[in-house]
Image: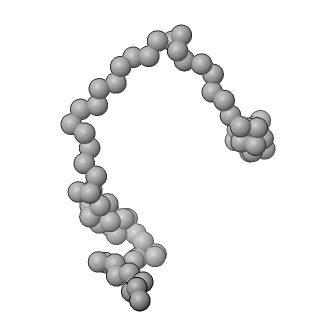
């Protein structure tokens, strides 16, 4: 039989404050290394075309006062 219990190294703080959030971030930071340098090349304007938005998303945004009016 498989043991499905999961043990967290630190108890979850559901109320959470800024200090616990910063601590969580500090513990996670070593797991994700940022690349030394990001090389991005310019894109020709002729390759940039309009953005396509699904109809459902467009209707959703249109219904939101911040975006639709």
Which quadrant of the structure image shows residue 67?
Answer: top right
* 39 to 60, vertically: above or below: above
Applied colour scheme? one colour
* Left or right, 52 with reference to 31: right
- When the figure is inspected, residue 63 is found, relative to residue 7, above or below; the finding is above
Q: Residue at x 54, y 18 (%)?
A: 48
- Against 46, residue 37 (above or below) is below
Query: Is residue 64 at least partly visible in the picture?
Result: yes
Which residue ends up furthest to the front in the rendered image?
Answer: 1
Point 52% across, 15% down: residue: 47
Q: Nearer the viewer, residue 12 or 31?
A: 31
Q: Residue furthest bottom?
A: 1
Residue drawn at x 60%, y 19% as measured from the top left: 49
Inspect this view and state whether residue 61 appears: no
Q: Decide: is 64 above or below 2.
A: above
Question: Is residue 5 left or right of 39 when viewed as pictured?
Answer: right
Q: Can you give x and y, in whole percent of width and height, for residue 1 in the image? A: 41, 89
Q: Residue at x 46, y 76 (%)?
A: 14
Q: So how many labels did they put on this image?
A: 0
- Asked if residue 27 lies left or right of residue 58, the reply is left
Query: What is the x, y in percent for residue 33?
Result: 25, 48
């Amino acid at each position: 039989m498989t043991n499905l219990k999961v043990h967290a190294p630190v108890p979850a703080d559901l109320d959470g404050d800024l200090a616990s959030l910063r601590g969580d971030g500090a513990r996670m930071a070593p797991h994700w290394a940022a690349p030394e340098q990001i090389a991005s090349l310019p894109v020709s304007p002729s390759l940039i075309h309009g953005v396509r938005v699904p109809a459902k998303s467009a209707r959703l945004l249109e219904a939101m006062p911040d975006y639709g009016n």
